[in-house]
Amino acid sequence: MNDKTIVANIYPSLNFSKIRDYITLTKPRLLSSVLFSTVLGYILPVGSSAGVLPLLYLLLGTAMIGSGANTLNQWQEQIPDSKMRRTKNRPLPTGKLSGNEALAFGIIISVAGFTTLWLSLNILTAALGLLTLFSYILIYTPLKQKSVSNTWFGGITGALPPVMGWTAARGTLDWEVLPIFALLYFWQLPHFFAIAWMYRDDYRRGGFKMLSLEDPTGKKTSVQMLFYGGLLFISSIAIFI
């Protein structure tokens, strides 16, 4: 009898492969970058006396909202994902998880994240978490199949976590957080444009609207990357001014 058989006999109700599929829905790699930016927003405010425990609550709540957003995004895009090579092996296109399972998981973990931020920190941070969630699933995700402007809107959503870190530490939303928001926003755009160019054929198969699909030579994409790369450099200096 091997170890897997022993575990299965002791915990017959647990399906470890399904647990792994749920974890996959949360996009752990993307989530880790979100949490890193959240920590930066938490530790940068000058004069903040916030301690370690609020930071842990912040990371927990943000991780749950981020997991919910990523899950609901895949629930919305399960048909396009099934047409794209880089996403066709995700849990929903392969049928490892049903749409209802993903929907329920996404809603439950999002509500849990919002509640954690509200009760453990403050309503402002919780509201920003909710704004991040809704802008991701109600604006950015639908816009991906309608307009190339989705890239710019997606950047706004992705730049909100450090603002949540700031409000968790300070309890207020101050102008001083703007350079941090700008830094992350301008960092994302060249990154998004590069990915969209690399996987342009895949995005075309999925029916997504990307600048790279209207740019056969790559010149438009290159100009955008250089432009926002310059703004990224300026915003990185502004943090220390």
Image (cartoon, grey):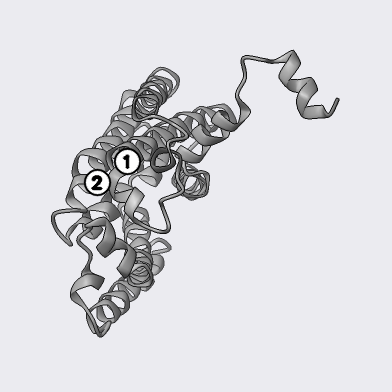
Q: Quadrant of the C terminus?
A: bottom left
Residue at 17% x, 50% y is: 143
Where residue 6 sits, quadrant-wise, is top right
- Label 2: state its secondary structure: helix
Residue 212 position, x and y percent, is 25, 72
Does the CB distance between marks 1 and 2 fall below 8 Å?
A: yes
Cα separation, mark 1 vs mark 2, equals 7 Å
In the image, residue 202 sits, relative to residue 175, either above or below, namely below
In the image, residue 150 sits, relative to residue 129, either above or below, namely below
Residue 5 position, x and y percent, is 77, 24
Residue at 31% x, 69% y is: 200
- Label 1: state its secondary structure: helix
- Closer to us: 16 or 167: 16
- Closer to us: 13 or 130: 13
Which badge, 1 or 2, comes first in the chain's sequence? Answer: 1
Q: Is residue 70 visible?
A: yes
- Closer to us: 85 or 74: 85
Residue placed under numbered mark 1 in the picture: 73
Residue placed under numbered mark 2 in the picture: 141
